[in-house]
Amino acid sequence: MELIDKFGRKISYLRLAVTDRCNLRCQYCMPAKGIDIVDRKELLSYKEMYRIIRVLSELGVDKVRLTGGEPFVRKDFVNFLDSLSFNDKLKEVNITTNGALISNHIEKLEALKINSINLSIDSLQKEKFAKITRRDVFDNVYDTLLKLEKSNLKLKLNIVVQSGFNTDEIIDFVELSKNKDIAVRFIEEMPFNGKGQRTINEVWDFNAIINHIKGAYKEIEPVLSKKSSTSRNYKIPNYKGTFGIIPAFTRTICNDCNRIRITATGMFKNCLFDNGVFNVRDYIRQGASDDELKALFITTVHHKPENGFVAEASRGNDVSESMSTIGG
């Protein structure tokens, strides 16, 4: 049994949020006052998360990305990672983090054979970083970046390109790939900030970002990526690392989508832009067997929308929740 949708796409990648809580308040993710966090008992327990991953791995999901909120905010997260090492069907366990809390855990993450860390960092300037995140933790995060780069973990930097905030730093970020073996990834800004799409003067979409970079270098080389890659990747000749652009809002990557999401409260999402299909936590707590969960997952994935525009239209184009609630 495998998870295959009606367009013939095989689902092999789960993004699971382990918490909706975060220690930062990034402007493009949530309002300054934060979001209404759910009661702790509404969150999936680690035991429930382990079981969900186990059942999905028996249906062909072999790659898991753990997100939040900020995953390291949740107590015992590293022990949960340790438990996942017992699932021999998983080929990759990856983590997305803001880096403010993980510097003491890096050696442990290496020992657990975590595959890659996606570090969210939207500015290399201390004051601007504080303005974007509404927190003064830049030195800590940049120190984490340097430590991760020296570790045996693959390091990807996630930069949300925000018109009027950090577009003047795009080339600075590309330059980080000169001497560091990292993947710098620029992400189109999305409306998941707890308020909805903000008014912007300039549209910094995929084309604007790539043209800006092309204007600064004599040559950029395309990098061959996996069919299901979320980013279009490139490198500057003779640079150690790479850079890529994730067209998260213009959604030109949907055709080869191999992903599903489960939020911290157990809402199963076939697509980032859908409204959630069913709550797997409720089924587990009502006593569903593994076979019943498998049947649910198979049926649900079969109805995965063709792309993010279809998913958004089916919910009435009302996209305004916080990315921290969905799972970044």
Image (tube, grey):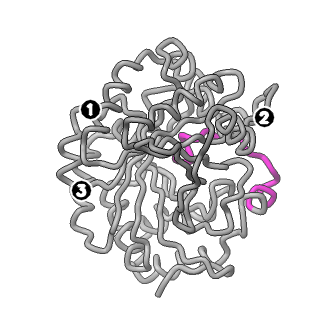
Q: Earlier in the sequence, mark 1 or mark 3?
A: 1
Q: Position of residue 140 (x, y in %)?
A: 34, 22
What is the three-letter code of the residue carrying label 3?
Lys
Residue bearing the label numbered 1 = 103
- Give the structural element (helix, strand or loop) at label 3: loop
Q: How far across and how far down the image is residue 175, in percent?
A: 49, 31
Reading the image, the residue beneath label 3 is 113
**Label 2 Cα crowd, 10 Å radius (few <14 / some 14-19 / many 20+):** some
Look at the image and give the residue range highlighted in magenta: 311-328
Question: Which residue lies at the image location 21% right of the left edge and 49% below the top edge?
Answer: 110
Q: Quadrant of residue 212?
A: top right
Q: Nearer the viewer, residue 137 or 68?
A: 137
Q: What number of labels is visible?
A: 3
Q: Which residue is mark 2?
A: 203
Q: Is residue 199 left or right of residue 148?
A: right
Q: At x 48% / y 71%, what residue is drawn?
A: 12
